Amino acid sequence: MAEDIAGSPGPSRRDVLRRGLFLGGAAVVGGAVGAVADHVAEHHDGGGDTVPFYGAHQGGVVTDTQQNTVIASFDLHTTSRDEVVEVLRRWTALAASLAHGDSTTVPIYTPKDVSDSYSNTTQISTTSDSLEAWQVGPSRLTVTIGFGRGLFLSEGKDRYGIASRMPEELVELPHFAGDELDPAQSDGDLFLQACGDDLQVVFHAVRSIARISPDVAALRWTQIGYSPSNKAGTPRNLMGFKDGTINSNAHPPADLDSTLWAPADGQSWMRGGTYLVYRRIRMSLEHWDRLQVGDQEKVIGRQKVSGAPLGARDEFDALDLDTRGSDGAPAIPVDAHVRLAAPETNDGAVLIRRAFAYNNGTTQFTERWPPWRQALEYDAGLLFLGYQQDPRKSFVAINSKLAINDALNQFTTHTASAVFAIPPGASGPGHWVGETLFA
Amino acid sequence: MAEDIAGSPGPSRRDVLRRGLFLGGAAVVGGAVGAVADHVAEHHDGGGDTVPFYGAHQGGVVTDTQQNTVIASFDLHTTSRDEVVEVLRRWTALAASLAHGDSTTVPIYTPKDVSDSYSNTTQISTTSDSLEAWQVGPSRLTVTIGFGRGLFLSEGKDRYGIASRMPEELVELPHFAGDELDPAQSDGDLFLQACGDDLQVVFHAVRSIARISPDVAALRWTQIGYSPSNKAGTPRNLMGFKDGTINSNAHPPADLDSTLWAPADGQSWMRGGTYLVYRRIRMSLEHWDRLQVGDQEKVIGRQKVSGAPLGARDEFDALDLDTRGSDGAPAIPVDAHVRLAAPETNDGAVLIRRAFAYNNGTTQFTERWPPWRQALEYDAGLLFLGYQQDPRKSFVAINSKLAINDALNQFTTHTASAVFAIPPGASGPGHWVGETLFA
Ligand code: HEM
Ligand code: HEM
């Protein structure tokens, strides 16, 4: 069965696709989509749990953390600027309608020059919703669209005539000590971050958007993340520590214009946008769980139960990096994660973090530190989603230090990475994300 | 860095472990666990969302579907019956306390004959909770424990003197047409199914139980699944169809004694237990989404929006396999999934299904049917968890037919598989799952 059609003596892929999917010997094109689509439209749920889609900024950046995320990246297989524009227009329209709890009503897009090469897409099952999230409600869905460097320059080519508009802030990250990045799970030309309180709703959004234009924008990778409900306060990461106490979407710095939103002297089309650095960071949970709580606290620099900085009392007390314990040593050790990451030790550089846990099951893993055990271990940890005004000043500067000195490194490995420009929001119906860049 | 300690010239693994984890040059054993553990114990949340753990049957079988599941399988690395008993005692006690919303208070178990071989487990971080789900509440957590064939017979060896008590129902499955099973994601000696409405709580349960006895019972695989909220009625699977309308945990058959619970003439220790067949079934969502809704309905044999059988009106109308359409053909086609799976065409054999979606991201995939496209596709689909009185009469009989004739096969591939005996529940504190087998 497993046979590449290209090398097969049978009907060509194109022929098979023209005739439709092969189903029990009968070709299956045409049919009763219209009726179902209408039925669905009547019942959409636009109630309670809705995060507005349109606005000066895209949602999903400082929006309160939802319980689930699916992030996805796409490679562009086209040299036509118009096709990219058409994809972004449709992605935006569909994202808006999903965020408002409407059914999928945006037609699938098959551009002329590829319409013949992959499937009679326009003939089969175009407007209908895959329906698995139907009537579940928007569940605080946000969809955030991002642009990778490849949109501007791909293998040195300016495919869409916009290379001159590539922001300086959209850097290529340097290699950091300890990185073990999987290229197949990293980077990409376009990016989607869907977040919501029901994973079925969230994946439905990515799947629906991905199927609008599979010929033009092909999936490169997807990654799922989750957060516990925040009914016990700041959600905890898989190390059991509160994550997001400060400089996070839940507790952002006071002045977002100087920390989060794209700089006033940068590319004007990015005004109201921001920059995302994504890192998938595996945790050696098996090792972490064998460490004394007191020592875990020294690694992080905060108390486990309360989340308070070491040497302080309450979660939201300020970090005091100068406090010393009775032994004369700094209460927050010199190699503690929060000391090395805090703005106070980074010329004021700030990262607005939106943290999710991820859990990809178990895989063989070689530990980075003695006893270098090779074993089946959890492939679980943190989806680091850091939003910032300028990754050169924030992520790159901070992580260059962390990668070398952070005590946390003994328990973490960065396994995937990407940087995306997150353009400003679409201001209302008819507008689209990317309009400021392309229009 | 990546160096197997066995071949390393440095300190032996045993030495390193005796000295504790290597942390910034300092060994880290001993410390302040007690204080945190006490603090935690004060605050446990035993409120609202609790499914009782103790009872004649284990929870998680006919319990209402929760939104998340983590299933995990373990290999036993011991020849001592006492050690297996000790593991099951502790697993049960911990499962009960987690289900009741208590913190992790069961000590980690390091049996004497392995205490020297892996880590000073009893010295480090034993009773403390990893804390990531602390105060989130039990979230309807259930933990279900199962036994694989390997518990009874492992490579022909009766390691624990219980081979004669292996139930006939605990069959080895035959190879089915189209199976593409990954052995590393299949089978196992012991099994855990944790279900609950918060993934962090659910994974916390598996992680906490797995760390009680890592030397004796080592993780073999884990798999995460989810279900949308059922506020829109029967939850839908990723094909967009309602899944669980009939013969499911939500809508079980009337007589569970003759369909679900272990047979009266079987092994007496299994009285009150049941048998689980697990299959991870990948869906070719990309193909499915290109199929007309009308044709999707012919594949399943039910209407997509309402869930009603073809030829009927309402979701819960009985399947009428004899109804014919105006064209004279059966309303439910001869190769429709529900026709072939229904008890009516299987000598009354019943499966109680507890369905979750899974989504493991994207991987390279070669499609099983024309155009045999090789592409990056979703590794997503269904976690089939079928509970039944006798897998020989139910799963094996039904799937032998489905694997050959089901129209659904064009869109599905079975990629992982396991069968477990699910013993009766523990009747109260002090009792344990497996007591009827071992005591
Ligand atoms: C698995 C990896 C990581 C874990 C488990 C982790 C965990 C934490 C925790 C528990 C805190 C303290 C609570 C809070 O302030 O929210 C924190 C703070 C922080 N982390 Fe991380 N982190 C990780 C990786 C990173 C990386 C890669 C960066 C940036 C390069 C980073 C930047 C920060 C920053 C900026 C803070 C706030 C510090 C402050 O302003 O006080 N973290 N992290
Ligand atoms: C990805 C694979 C599968 C999908 C998407 C799927 C989907 C469905 C759907 C939509 C229904 C109708 C709704 C309902 O009655 O709950 C159904 C019914 C059923 N399925 Fe599946 N199924 C799959 C695999 C299997 C397998 C492998 C078996 C057993 C070997 C099975 C056994 C059944 C049974 C017994 C019923 C109920 C039939 C009746 O009593 O009317 N299914 N399935």
Image (cartoon, coloured by chain):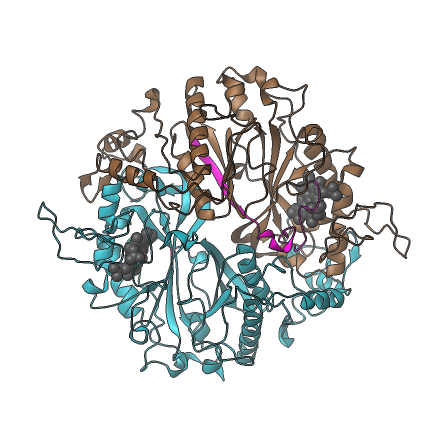
Chain colours: A cyan, B brown
Residue depicted at 37% across the width and 46% down the height: B132
Q: What is the magenta segment's predominant secondary structure?
A: loop
Q: Position of residue B360 (x, y in %)?
A: 52, 50
The picture places residue B268, in percent across and down from the top left corner, at: 61, 18
Residue B239 is one of the magenta-drawn residues: yes
Q: Where is ligand 1, by quadrant?
A: bottom left
Please state the extent of the stretch shown in magenta in the rendering.
B218-247
Residue A277 forms part of the magenta stretch: no
Residue B196, given in percent of the width and then of the height, sits at 51, 44
Q: Is residue B154 above or below residue A415?
A: above
Picture quadrant of residue A63 = bottom left
Q: In which quarter of the image is the N terminus of chain B?
A: top left
Q: Which residue lies furthest to the front in this view?
A: B47
Task: Say which of B296 and B432 sits in front.
Answer: B432
For the point 41% across and 54% down, the residue is A230
Q: Which residue is more in the foreground, B174 or B263?
A: B263
Q: Position of residue B256 (x, y in %)?
A: 68, 31
Q: Can residue B3 be seen in this view?
A: no
Is residue A52 shown left or right of residue B319?
A: left
